[in-house]
Amino acid sequence: MSTNPETTGISSTESSTAGRALPRLFKAGLIGWGLGTLIVFGLSWVVAKPGTLPLAMLWTLNNWWIGFIVGVIALIAAGVMGKLPLGRGLAAFVLPMLVLAAVAALCLAVYPNRGLREDLMTFLPVVLFFYAVAYLWMNMKRVRESGQQFVQAVFPPLVGGIAVLAGVAVPVFASNEFRYRDTFSLRVIDTRVENGLLVCDGSLAIHQPDAFQFRAPRYVWADEDAVTEDGKIVWGKGGEPNGSAGEYPFQVSWTKGVPSGGVKEIGLYEDMLCIEVRLKDDDKVVYSLCQPLVGE
């Protein structure tokens, strides 16, 4: 494709100005992003009151987007004050982040998981490194054509950012937690102390059939140590799940950590009904469900 000013309709002066503008604007955006991140770090001590340096850094990472916006403002300010054409420079700076934000939003739309959201927010700031790589590339391999500079600016953060997102999202989407997220529903019907036992009536719905096995461990504190007791599960009408979908009532009872004053005295961290799911002939837990033993 011809880049001759006579055939493109762009004067050599305009092309030269655009070629010089993009690196300068990109540099201003990077500096603004860095300064914005430092400002966010300083604000963390006032707004979040983390108390420790690691918590302040974590708060800064979770609010990295504020620093990025400061970078965009710095880029625009540099363009206005330097009377530089903003179009390509602003697009090159913003486009990779918009694409990455869209990909992250799509991941969360598919799996609105709190852990995934926190990981994405924590690792997305790593893209700043790839923005710096893009700026170094533009300076190490100088080209006058603004279109080539645009590719130099966009390619590293876009590819690097996709790699970062993949590193976070792929293990999550390959996990059992994602695979079985819609397979079970657990409901607590009643909890009581009966004949020296802590007894819970509940119902387990299985939406996708498979050869599952279930345990009901309860964690209680005894002499400042955590003790685990597998509750005795008695399945109600319909019997034990045999690989078929359906709703299965059950009763589970425990002998340890039984409050003498009734269920209202169940201690903190001892007040959850947890069902561990395993596949048949495999002792590895593939999924866990938890519900409070006692309602509000």
Image (spheres, grey):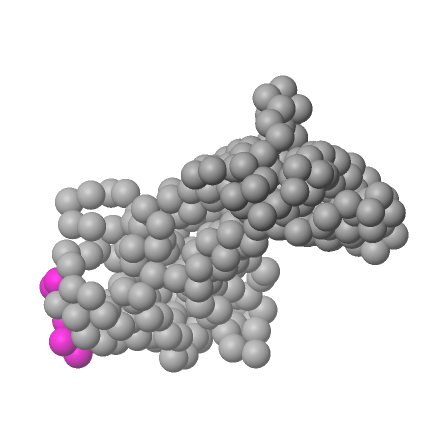
Left or right: residue 31 versus residue 150 is right
Determine if residue 275 is in view.
Answer: no
Task: Judge by depth and name the residue closer to the eye, 289 or 78.
Answer: 78
Residue drawn at (12%, 64%) of the image: 242
Query: Residue 269's image quarter?
Result: bottom right
246 part of magenta stretch? no
Magenta segment boundaries in residue numbering: 236-243
Residue at image x 15%, y 59%?
210
Depth order, front residue of 109/241: 109
Q: Say left or right for 225 vs 170.
A: right
Looking at the rendering, in which quadrant would you find the C terminus?
Answer: bottom right
Q: Nearer the viewer, residue 142 or 56?
A: 142
Magenta stretch: includes residue 238: yes
Reply above or below: 238 against 259. Answer: below
> In the visual, does 204 lie left or right of 113?
left
Vertical placement of residue 31 versus 69, above or below: above
Give the image location of residue 155, x and y in percent: 51, 37
Q: Is residue 62 left or right of residue 49?
A: left
